Image: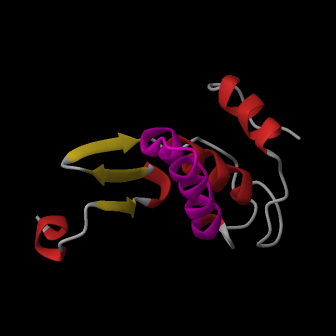
Amino acid sequence: QLLALSGASTAVLTLGEEGLIGSEGGDVIEVAARPVHTIDRLGAGDAMAAGVLHGLLGGDFTQGLHYGVMMAALALTQHGDIVITSATELEMLMAAAGSSISR
């Protein structure tokens, strides 16, 4: 309802440990968070946004939501607020869904 009132056609709402919800063109997509052992929460939201933008720039909003969840998980498993990764590593981690994140 808030999205309709805002006039925005695309939005993402983070749900913390539960993941996120995205909406584009009236479709609502929920993506569960990756379970991780949290070391530091700093930068997780920025990392999530970077992942979503990566997907958007690639033309796939839904994939961007999944990238966002993975990037947030990476941020949570390290100290500090900078996630250093590559598109190749991100794809490998996405392909290994269900396994623990180790680098």
Please tell me whether residue 56 belongs to the stretch shown in magenta. yes
Identify the image's colour scheme: rainbow, by chain, secondary structure or one colour. Answer: secondary structure
Q: Nearer the viewer, residue 85 or 99?
A: 85
Q: Nearer the viewer, residue 98 or 64?
A: 64
Please tell me whether residue 54 belongs to the stretch shown in magenta. yes
Q: Residue furthest right?
A: 103
15 relative to 81 in the view: left or right: left
| Secondary structure, magenta segment, majority class | helix
88 relative to 6 in the view: left or right: right
Q: Number of marks in the image?
A: 0
User: Where does the image place residue 51, in percent across and percent down from the top left?
Assistant: 61, 53
> What residue appears at the point 12 percent right and 66 percent down from the top-left corner?
4
User: Where does the image place residue 19, in percent across and percent down from the top left?
Assistant: 45, 50
User: Where does the image place residue 102, in percent across and percent down from the top left?
Assistant: 84, 38
Q: Quadrant of residue 31?
A: top left
**Does 77 sit above or below residue 91?**
below
Quadrant showing the C terminus: top right
User: Where does the image place residue 98, in percent across and percent down from the top left?
Assistant: 62, 25
Range of the magenta residues?
45-65
Q: Quadrant of residue 15?
A: bottom left
Quadrant showing the N terminus: bottom left
**Does 16 sit above or below residue 42?**
above
> What residue appears at the point 76 percent right and 72 percent down from the top-left corner?
81
**Does 61 sit above or below residue 47?**
above
> What residue appears at the point 50 percent right and 44 percent down from the top-left corner?
59
Q: Quadrant of residue 83?
A: bottom right
